[in-house]
Image: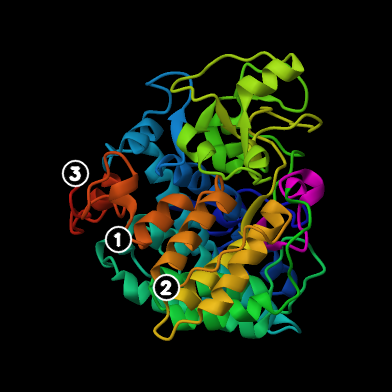
Amino acid sequence: MKNIKIHLGFIAMLASAMFVACGDDFVEVDPINENSEDFFNSEEDYQDALVGAYDLLQATYLNVMIGEIASDNALSGGESATDSPGIQQIDNMTHTPVNQQLRDIWGWMFAGVNRANYILEFQDKTDFSGKDQVIAQARFLRAYYYFELVKWFGDVPLAVDQRLLFGDQFNIDRTPKAEVYAQIEQDLIFAAETLPPTQAEQGRITSGAARALLGKAYLYQDKFTEAADALDQVIAGPYDLVQDYSTIFELEGENSVESVFEVQYTDKEGAGFGCLQCSEGNVAVGFNGIRNYSGPLFDSGFSFNVPVQEAYDAFEPGDTRRDIAILNIEEFAAANGATYNEGYKHTGFYNRKYIARKGDANLGDANLTNPNNYRSIRFADVLLMAAEAHNRKANPNDGLAQQYLNRVRRRAFGDTDHDITASGAALTDFIYAERRLELVGEGHRFFDLVRTGRAAQNIDGFSTGKNEVFPIPVIEIELTGNRWEQNQGYTN
């Protein structure tokens, strides 16, 4: 993270110990690594472990990219039909339990859970002033990783305040997602009540971030009244919309007043394809980049995650967001003398929010170390979630829903002429449409369509009763001795 120094492999180092003996007692080698059971003897130990728990946030670049590709916003792209087959399968809704990208998401998110649980397992070992702040951040992170896991896979093994260690797979079962959500809620309520509204160090979790994610978790369970209450508290401050939408996704727009929770990236430490999750940079930015590009403003990339014409055309005339969110490469190249190559499934568009800009250090592999932060929860997203919650709750408050919705639209159009005055189901549809426009390219679309029951009518190849969740990686089921059942509709 930009301001929270990451030590890659830190937790893996602490979780292992080495002892070598050779039959007789005359040959003994002392452990070269610390024993994880002997850690947490000072505040520094807890803070170091907390940084390790933050680290896996950077691996969520894949969740964001595939969340767009799986939706009707974008196509897979890449170099060819065989470029990253797992991504191509997800685009076509033909993915199976043998899919490298899905296995990565499962493994990386559970690594995040384990790192948070490592702290919580030993939370009572050593006391120091401010330890409650460390515990609250760890609980938020556990909730964040579990929320991702539930979104992608449904029922998942739930571990609370203890690590999942090798061998546990023979005893632990998948937990119903309702129980996982209940733990997510408990963790986020604790974090919201414990953490301050602002942090001195950018990237640290705040009470507002916890309440925003809590409201989102409620929304995903159709708990609209609870969602509205939580999100209203976030709207009360200290957040606001930035005036100029075009600045949000540039480096100078990072950690702005609109940022409720932002995953920090840097271009100062490189990585390679052998360990994509090791990159300190936003890997998705390079994957989304323009293939073999030469010209102003942007750098080259691998041409994945290309927006479709229909998403581009969904913007109304006068909506200033369209050309900030989606790059029309053919028009841009003609106007600026740029050159590029067309990739697989070329649409003529790129995700401008998250493509490589010129001027980055890009140490290591330039396509893997872009510094662009991921705006995980923006204030505009909070306003639209709150609008939906107020509109859909048992006793609707459509007036407040309109107010929240129109705050977003007034920035987009620069006037009040495009305000929405509808109510009831018509207002619901306007809110859904606005979420697509405001958040296109940010990884939310697939899950919005699923949770609102609109996926089958919008996503080609989507099978109701199957594709609402993704398959459990087959290797995970095999490691349990084939005790777990696969998600409905998928065959191991």
Position of residue 23 measured from the top left corner of the image (x, y, whole percent) = 40, 50
- Quarter of the figure with the C terminus: top left
Q: Using the rendered view, name the quadrant where residue 300 is placed.
A: top right
Residue 171 horizontal side relative to residue 69, left or right: left
Percent x, y of residue 51: 67, 60
Answer above or below: position of 423 versus 14: below
The reply, left or right, for residue 237 in relation to residue 343 is right
Between 449 and 34, the residue placed more toward the observer is 449
Q: Identify the amino acid type marked 2.
A: Gly
Crowdedness near tag 1: few (<14), some (14–19) or many (≥20) residues, C-alpha within 10 Å: some
Identity, as a three-letter code, of the amino acid under mark 1: Gln
Q: Which residues are magenta?
A: 246-263
Residue 115 belongs to the span the image colors magenta: no
Viewer-nearest residue: 491 or 293: 293
Above or below: residue 467 compared with residue 176: above
Q: Which residue is mark 2?
A: 424
- Residue occupied by mark 1: 169
Q: What percent of the width, then of the height, locates residue 168?
A: 32, 64
Front position in the image: 396 or 153? 396
Tag 2 near tag 1, CB within 8 Å: no
Q: Is residue 38 visible?
A: no
182 or 484: nearer the viewer: 182
For mark 3, what is the residue? 492
**Kind of element beneath mark 2:** helix
Disc on the earlier residue, 1 or 3: 1
Q: Residue at x 53, y 56 (%)?
A: 434
- Which circle marks residue 240 in the picture? none
Q: Callout 2: 10 Å neighbours few (<14), some, many (20+)?
A: few
